[in-house]
Image: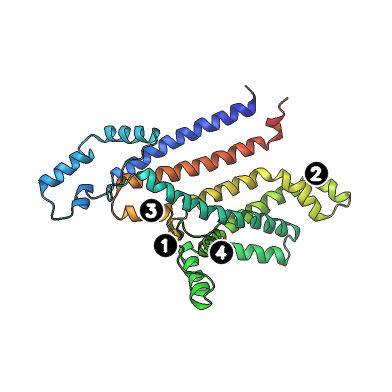
Amino acid sequence: MHPVVKLIAQRLALGLLLLWAASVLIFVGTEILPGDVAQNILGQSATPQALENLRAQLGLNEPPLTRYFSWFGGVLQGDLGTALSNGQDIATSMGKRLGNTLFLAFWAAVVAVPLAIVLGIIAVRYRNRWPDKVISTFTLATVSVPEFLLGYIAIFFLSVQVRWLPSLATIHDGMSLGEKLQVIALPVLVLVLTVLGHMMRMTRAAILNVMESAYVETAELKGLRPINIIARHALPNAIAPVVNVVMLNLAYLVVGVVVVEVVFVYPGMGQYLVDHVSKRDVPVVQACGLVFAAVYIGMNLIADVVSILANPRLRHPK
């Protein structure tokens, strides 16, 4: 088997193993949560018989191992179960929410990824000079501020003071693309500021590492312009670590948007999860956790595969 195909197959197998381990951790984590699901649904005035009947109906009296395999078997067949709080199919409800979260993450990535790469190149070009220092200070400052605080600062200045953008990011099917983009402008801004620093710093570090190579010194001795050396020689050879950090941050944009969605009341996966955690709706929490784990593992898997393909020693083995 070709070494590249073998490595990719190993990464895929490891990804599936990690996803299965995540499903076990999610199930165990929800099992040890305090409280009684039946009591939460029926309320404190429920009779012992009613509670016992509901536990039997929900399968809560079954051994944990039986319930895990029943749940995981359903997941493998595309059945995420039914929400306890409203009786709705979880996969159907989650599909629309996941679409909204991906929509938000997509537009944040469209702004953040090219901006981070451009700022990283500028920082390298003017290394240790004022443009590098200004970019590094600004991005590190935005990374250091918690997301919820960035959100409230953005709402205060851009929604309350100057009234340029709406403070709530509620979208629905009847809105045009332009209306949706206007509504999600603030959460996109917060997400961009959250991931920009990490991606810019890693891009800068990866390019600087390549700039110390002998062939870059040769290019400098030939009299090539610094920006051409960075664009044509350093950046293509630093693509693997850059793709890695970009993928990790794209995973964060999907998985880590819970706080941003709650702050801006955005109807995505994070808001959906928080709503049902407060109701102790275990099937929804398990399904959301598994989807988040799958997205995170999938993005890391893509980053690994791109890194493998970008390695000339693997693409052209002797």
- Determine whether label 2 and label 1 are within 8 Å by CB: no
Nearer the N terminus, badge 2 or badge 4? 4
- Mark 4 is on which residue type? Thr
Q: Residue furthest top?
A: 1
Element at badge 2?
helix
Separation of marks 4 and 3 at Cα, in angstroms: 27 Å
Element at badge 3?
helix
Please tell me whether mark 2 or mark 1 is closer to you in this view. 1
Image spot of residue 219 (x, y percent):
84, 47
- Mark 3 is on which residue type? Tyr
Nearer the N terminus, badge 4 or badge 3? 4
Crowding at label 3, few (<14), some or many (≥20) Cα neighbours within 10 Å?
Answer: many
Position of residue 115 in the picture relative to residue 248 (left or right):
right
Element at badge 4?
helix
Image spot of residue 8 (x, y percent):
58, 31
Q: Which label is found at residue 272? A: 3
Q: Residue furthest bottom?
A: 161
- Taking the spot 26% from the left edge, 36% from the top edge, the residue there is 64
Please name the residue that numbered disc 2 is placed on: 214
Please tell me whether mark 2 or mark 4 is closer to you in this view. 4
- Mark 2 is on which residue type? Ala
Camera-nearest residue between 215 and 45: 45
- Mark 1 is on which residue type? Val
Nearer the N terminus, badge 1 or badge 3? 1
Element at badge 1?
loop
Q: Which label is found at residue 175? A: none
Looking at the image, can residue 7 be seen? Answer: yes
Camera-nearest residue between 18 and 285: 285
Q: Which label is found at residue 265? A: 1
Rendered-image quadrant of the N terminus = top right
Crowding at label 1, few (<14), some or many (≥20) Cα neighbours within 10 Å?
Answer: some
Please tell me whether mark 4 or mark 3 is closer to you in this view. 3
